[in-house]
Image (cartoon, rainbow, N blue to C red):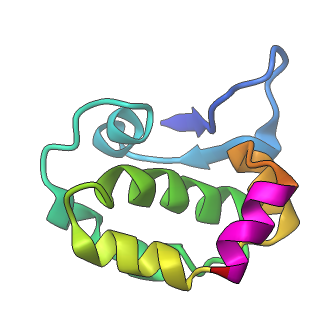
Amino acid sequence: MTFELPPAPTEPDFGRCLMLCSDCANELGGGAIANPERWRCLNNSAWSETAPVQAAAVLVLRRLAENSPWAGELLEQLHLEADTRILLGDEPEEAEEAESD
């Protein structure tokens, strides 16, 4: 299924879209994460040079980090490029502070 990263603009933007299974799309879209261990694949996806892939990984990691230490550790290691930060809706100052910590 095609999944557009939130917040979705009024007009579809294929630069914000990913092809996902329905379970992944549901959980990425804010549904309950049934099995956090299922998302261990983000150890690779989080380093993707494709901004929508990295942004999707960060969205899930942020949710998982509350209860899964491995997700928080991975988030701390990531360097997010400007295009990924834009997709995430992060403020440039916020992103720069996170990188300097």
Locate residue 52: give its quadrant. bottom right
How far from the left and from the top, in percent, is residue 89?
A: 74, 42
In this rendering, is residue 90 above or below 76? Answer: above
Q: Main secondary structure of the magenta part?
A: helix
Give the residue furthest to the top. 10
Locate residue 84: give its quadrant. bottom right
Q: Is residue 93 left or right of residue 89?
A: right
Q: Is residue 46 magenta?
A: no
How far from the left and from the top, in percent, is residue 62?
A: 43, 55
Look at 20% across and 58% down and name the residue there. 67
How far from the left and from the top, in percent, is residue 83?
A: 85, 60
The magenta segment: 93-100
Look at 84% across and 18% down and name the residue there. 11
Q: Is residue 44 left or right of residue 70?
A: right
Q: Is residue 96 magenta?
A: yes
Judging depth in this view, the residue of 22 and 50 nearest the camera is 50
In this rendering, is residue 6 above or below 92? Answer: above
Look at 71% across and 81% down and name the residue there. 100
Q: Is residue 79 visible?
A: no
